[in-house]
Amino acid sequence: MKISDGVQMLELYVEAFDSRQELNPTLIWDDETAILIDTGTPGQLEQIRTAMNEVGVSMGNLKAIILTHQDIDHIGSLPEILNESSGGIEVYAHEVDKPYIEGELPLMKGNPDSMAWQLEGLSEEVRQKVLASVENPPTAKVDRTLVDGEELPYCGGIRVIFTPGHTPGHISLYLKKGKILVAGDAMFSVEGILQGPHQPSTPDMDTAFQSMKKYMDFDIEKVVCYHGGLSQNNVKNQLEDLVRKV
Ligand SMILES: [Zn+2]
């Protein structure tokens, strides 16, 4: 789905789960650079490639991949993408989630307890598949860590907003061109309505709500949630309402 000129929300589907789940990485590009924010679950390389080709961006154009956080549905196809490239893609993430992404520490949500809400209602076969993937998660080197407030000089400027809570190293990205907030999993959305942090998958709800206050410093017209997609109607009011409850 086109969000703005040079900003595309990819629509990936996880077919393995009983209910078809949509994941929404964001692709940003201009004449010089293409950047992908988050990479789907393991095995989604071809879906990502197809979605990128549809807007005329090839894997070879990718200069960087930004990970909003360590969860497997965000880092999943990273090694596959890097394998294909000739080494020209830099991987960015926040320092706190870096050791999990690099495999130094086990993923925080990589055990049956933390995944109970996701496993509920799945057939035993699918359940085992999901558990096997988190027990042996994909790993990749993080080339550069990002800090709160910094601005990456790509595609009109990308501001980093440190938004811990969903994981301790979670970041959101603000795309100056288009006034777009890429929220990752700091919030989820249902039919264009922002819902705040997703309780079952957010270990620290208090911190997650506090993090959302940082959005008030930005002039936001559109929000892309990784789960739930685009919200663009009165998002400023929606955000104010959510933050007011804190
Ligand atoms: Zn997620």
Image (cartoon, helix red, strand yellow):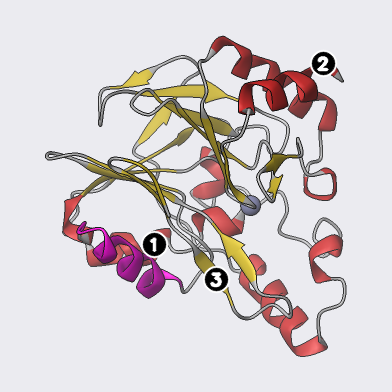
**Of the pair 209 and 90, the residue shown nearer to us:** 209
Q: Amino acid at mark 1?
A: Pro
Above or below residue 74? Residue 83 is: below
Other residues around mark 1 within 10 Å, as few (<14) / some (14–19) / many (≥20): some
**x, y (%) of residue 206?**
84, 25
Q: Give the structural element (helix, strand or loop) at label 1.
A: helix
Residue 195 in the figure: left or right of residue 234: right
Residue 246 shows in this picture: no
Mark closer to the observer (3, 2) = 2
Mark 1 or 3: the one toward you: 3
Residue underneath mark 3 = 13
**Quarter in which the N terminus is drawn:** bottom left
Q: Are marks 3 and 2 in contact (CB under 8 Å)?
A: no
What secondary structure is marked by label 3?
strand
Residue at position x 56%, y 59% from top? 23
Tell me how far mark 1 sits from mark 3, CA to CA. Answer: 19 Å
Q: Circle 2: is it few (<14), some (14-19), or many (20+) Cα within 10 Å? A: few
The amino acid sitting under disc 2 is Arg
- For marks 2 and 1, give the CA distance: 40 Å
Report the residue at 59% width, 58% height from top. Answer: 72
Q: Amino acid at mark 3?
A: Tyr
The quarter of the rendered structure image containing the C terminus is top right
Image x and y of residue 24, in percent: 52, 54
Q: Is residue 71 magenta?
A: no
Residue designated by label 1:
79
Magenta span of residues: 44-57
Q: Residue under circle 2?
A: 244
Identify the secondary structure beneath mark 2.
helix
On screen, residue 205 versus residue 8, left or right, reads right
**CA–CA distance in space, label 3 to label 2:** 34 Å
Farthest front residue? 233
Lower position in the chain sequence, tag 3 or tag 2: 3
